[in-house]
Amino acid sequence: MTRPPSLLLLALCCSLPLVALSNPKNPTFSHGPDSKRQDGVPRGKVTRHEWKSDILKGTLRQWYLYVPAQYDGSKEAAVMVFQDGHAYVDEAGDIRVPVVFDNLINRGEMPVTIGIFLNPGLFTDKLEGRQGWKAPPGVKRNRSVEYDSLSADYVTFLEKEILAEVGKSHKLTNDPAMRAICGMSSGGICAFTAAWERPDLFHKVVSHIGSFTNIRGGHVYPALIRKTENKPLRVFLQDGSNDLDNAHGNWWLGNLQMEKALQFRKYDHKTVWGEGGHSGKHGGAIFPETMRWLWRDWKGTK
């Protein structure tokens, strides 16, 4: 099997932030200037909300809304949805989406985009503090059911509840080519499932360390992709050779199988591989370049 290109080669060829490999099993990743606040760049506004779902019954979750400074309500905005929203909206975290969006939107390298950052549902009637990776003691999470299931339930929740709610106060595009969805780990396979099930809602997918393994049957996607008529999707995959390996499967091999299936069907796709583990660090370091690739032709979208 051909060995994936080194991270140094990837950085040189793709203009990605350079990676220090003092320990191949624990590489460090650096954020570039587009992941940092820049003088003179208008800041979007981030607000936090809660949502009690009727479709995903019994669940309560925190979610965040990012509205770029350039949005004035006169035109429809593009939309990007993030699973595990707390990890993506954090300006001091690995991905730093609001900072990246502010910088790229300001330069016209991506459209004016409203960001929706959703946390997974919790079976509780009250949330205190900031919802993160762990549920409060005694509270059951619905994350795996929502994210790992191969069904349209979650994307229906997005359509009927979340997008509809945001659409009450903001003009959102109905063009699926101007809608993207993103997540990491189980949130990554969730992003793919949402677009796979409803390409009329989402054309663009970003998966960081996606769980294309047998948690709830997600290992079948490479076979499904190969034998299913192509859908109008653009797919970005990131993973590392030191990702998880457990009873559910091998995350690295699962992502390589996804790559081969997308290649076989000639999908519009891009993969960036490295030697990282199961975290958002690599995906965060390359996130600005990921957005440039994802939205590279947005000015020509009708």
Image (cartoon, grey):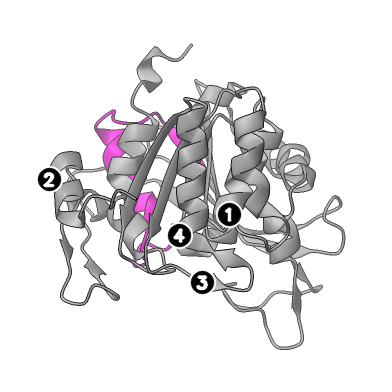
- Sequence-first tag of 4 and 2: 2
State yes or no: discs 1 and 3 in contact (Cβ < 8 Å). no
Question: Does dot 2 land on a helix, a strand or a loop?
Answer: helix
Residue at mark 4: 252
Which of label 4 and label 2 is nearer to you? Answer: 4
Residue at mark 3: 245
State yes or no: discs 1 and 2 in contact (Cβ < 8 Å). no
Question: Does dot 4 land on a helix, a strand or a loop?
Answer: helix
Q: Does the image show residue 42?
A: no
Mark 3: few/some/many CA within 10 Å (<14, 14-19, 20+)? few
Mark 4: few/some/many CA within 10 Å (<14, 14-19, 20+)? many
**Residue at screen point 20% across, 47% down:** 10
Q: Callout 1, which amino acid?
A: Phe
User: CA separation, marks 3 and 2?
Assistant: 29 Å
Q: Does the image show residue 62?
A: yes
Q: Is residue 257 magenta?
A: no
Q: In this view, does 140 lie above or below 56?
A: below
Residue at mark 1: 212
Q: Callout 3, which amino acid?
A: Asp
Over which residues does the magenta segment extend?
90-115
Q: Callout 2, which amino acid?
A: Leu
Question: Does dot 3 land on a helix, a strand or a loop?
Answer: strand
- Sequence-first tag of 1 and 3: 1
State yes or no: discs 4 and 3 in contact (Cβ < 8 Å). yes
**Residue at screen point 58% across, 56% down:** 187
- Sequence-first tag of 4 and 1: 1
Q: Is residue 291 above or below residue 219?
A: above
Q: Residue 48 at what x, y percent from top left?
A: 57, 59
User: CA separation, marks 1 and 2?
Assistant: 28 Å
Residue at mark 2: 12
